[in-house]
Image (cartoon, rainbow, N blue to C red):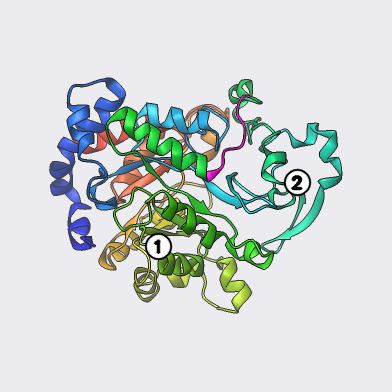
């Protein structure tokens, strides 16, 4: 789907020249420049390939500034100018609704622990082979979850975000789809979203298969086509194979560290690791049903024993050769998340040289990036494209 063109655009001066006009639109969205509206009108009209490159994806919204997966976070990311909003890590309720939480365990992202009526729901489960203790969405009805409120997931790092604790409820994905339509109408340009199917094998074994539920919602809202403004992602390749049979949406396989195996592979006995999937033959297999990959940034540029970036791998070129776009995760501003050679000072929660880190990753030819701080990402993108 236009993949050779993507590959050619991914390198050097030709790429910068081609993207020069597009970045004016992205920068204008933040800075109020006159070119913003005209450039943005082009975004989303021809499917995912029409998105500006590098694409800035608001990771769980604007989770650097608001509790993640809330409408406060999604709205802010959109207002900051993100090209796509990761609106929805999708997990089901007991009565089959898809809601937006980072994980099915919600003790760290909601105030459920402060609700004595739910104290007896706390339990320990095996989640993809890991013993996990807390409260799980599949043990609550939607009505019960709607009595909870979202809180900051990493308060020690983002203490300022805690002032918004309790302000927003847990959104359903159906509410996200309606919000997407509303914002598209208000802004006069297509709003894009990038939901993730979380732990689909785990939920299928519970009788709560999420792929069919997602497909039904996409069909209901007319967003199940190849050019629909919804990119679907998952760490489980076979889940996306299933989605490929159900809908026409663009699909992206998320890839963790090289020595890990997707949980669906573990369950089925497939011996392949992520290291196998990022070889040319593995990428060709992924490209048989998906349009992109979402690798961890360490698969793009590994770190040495001291946490410094080393030499880029061949993954960007190899993926482009297979016809796949790359949207790696996740850029964050705080020192604690940055490579050692881009940290500044000794405070792990202070901002580091994030612009230097963005430039280094953009220079590899990636097609976009997930970022907790969309405004920072857009400025870094402008520096790169215009530089």
In this rendering, the answer to whether 277 lies above or below 97 is below
Image quadrant in which the N terminus is located = bottom left
Dominant secondary-structure state across the stretch colored magenta: loop
Where is residue 226 shown, x and y percent of the image? Answer: 31, 58
Secondary structure type for disc 2:
loop
Q: On the picture, is 59 further left or further right than 53?
A: right
* Within-10-Å neighbours for mark 1: few <14, some 14–19, many 20+: many
Image-quadrant location for residue 112: top right
What label does residue 247 carry, if any? 1
The structure residue drawn at horizontal position 35% and vertical position 58%, both measured from the top left corner, is 250
Which of the 4 image quarters holds residue 233?
bottom left
Locate residue 294, reporting x and y percent.
42, 55
| Mark 1 and mark 2 residues within 8 Å of each other at the beta carbon | no
Question: From mark 1 to mark 2, how far is it between C-alphas?
Answer: 32 Å
Q: Is residue 247 above or below residue 83?
A: below
Q: Position of residue 40 (x, y in %)?
A: 23, 35
The mark found on residue 135 in the picture is 2
Q: Is residue 40 above or below residue 4?
A: above
Q: Which residues are magenta?
A: 167-173
* Mark 2 Cα shell of 10 Å, populated few (<14), some (14-19), many (≥20): many
Asked if 186 appears above or below 285 in the picture, the reply is: above
């Amino acid at each position: 789907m236009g993949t050779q063109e993507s590959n050619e655009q991914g390198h050097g001066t030709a790429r910068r020249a081609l993207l020069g006009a597009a970045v004016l639109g992205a920068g204008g969205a933040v800075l109020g420049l006159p070119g913003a509206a005209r450039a943005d009108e082009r975004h989303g009209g021809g499917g995912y390939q029409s998105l500006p490159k590098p694409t800035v994806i608001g990771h769980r919204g604007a989770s650097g500034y608001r509790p993640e997966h809330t409408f406060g976070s999604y709205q802010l990311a959109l207002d900051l100018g993100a090209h796509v909003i990761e609106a929805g890590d999708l997990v089901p309720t007991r009565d089959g609704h898809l809601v937006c939480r980072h994980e099915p365990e919600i003790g760290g992202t909601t105030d459920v622990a402060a609700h004595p009526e739910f104290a007896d729901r706390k339990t320990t489960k095996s989640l993809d082979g890991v013993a996990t203790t807390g409260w799980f969405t599949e043990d609550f009805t939607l009505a019960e979850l709607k009595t909870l409120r979202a809180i900051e997931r990493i308060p020690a790092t983002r203490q300022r975000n805690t002032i918004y604790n309790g302000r927003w409820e847990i959104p359903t994905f159906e509410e996200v789809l309606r919000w997407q339509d509303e914002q598209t109408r208000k802004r006069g340009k297509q709003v894009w979203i990038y939901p993730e199917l979380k732990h689909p094998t785990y939920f299928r074994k519970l009788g709560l298969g999420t792929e069919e539920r997602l497909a039904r919602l996409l069909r209901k809202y007319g967003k199940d086509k190849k050019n629909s403004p919804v990119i679907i992602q998952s760490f489980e390749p076979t889940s996306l194979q299933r989605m490929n049979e159900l809908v026409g949406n663009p699909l992206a396989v998320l890839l963790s560290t090289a020595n890990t195996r997707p949980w669906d592979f573990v369950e089925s006995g497939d011996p392949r690791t992520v290291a196998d999937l990022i070889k040319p033959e593995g990428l060709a297999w992924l490209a048989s049903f998906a349009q992109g990959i979402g690798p961890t940034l360490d698969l793009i540029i590994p770190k040495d024993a001291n946490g410094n970036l080393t030499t880029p791998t061949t993954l960007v070129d190899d993926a482009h050769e297979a016809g796949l776009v790359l949207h790696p995760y996740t850029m964050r501003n705080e020192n604690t998340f940055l490579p050692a050679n881009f940290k500044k000072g000794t405070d792990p929660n202070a901002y580091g040289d994030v612009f230097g880190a963005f430039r280094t990753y953009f220079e590899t030819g990636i097609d976009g990036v997930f970022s907790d701080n969309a405004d920072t990402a857009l400025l870094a993108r402008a520096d790169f494209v215009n530089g």
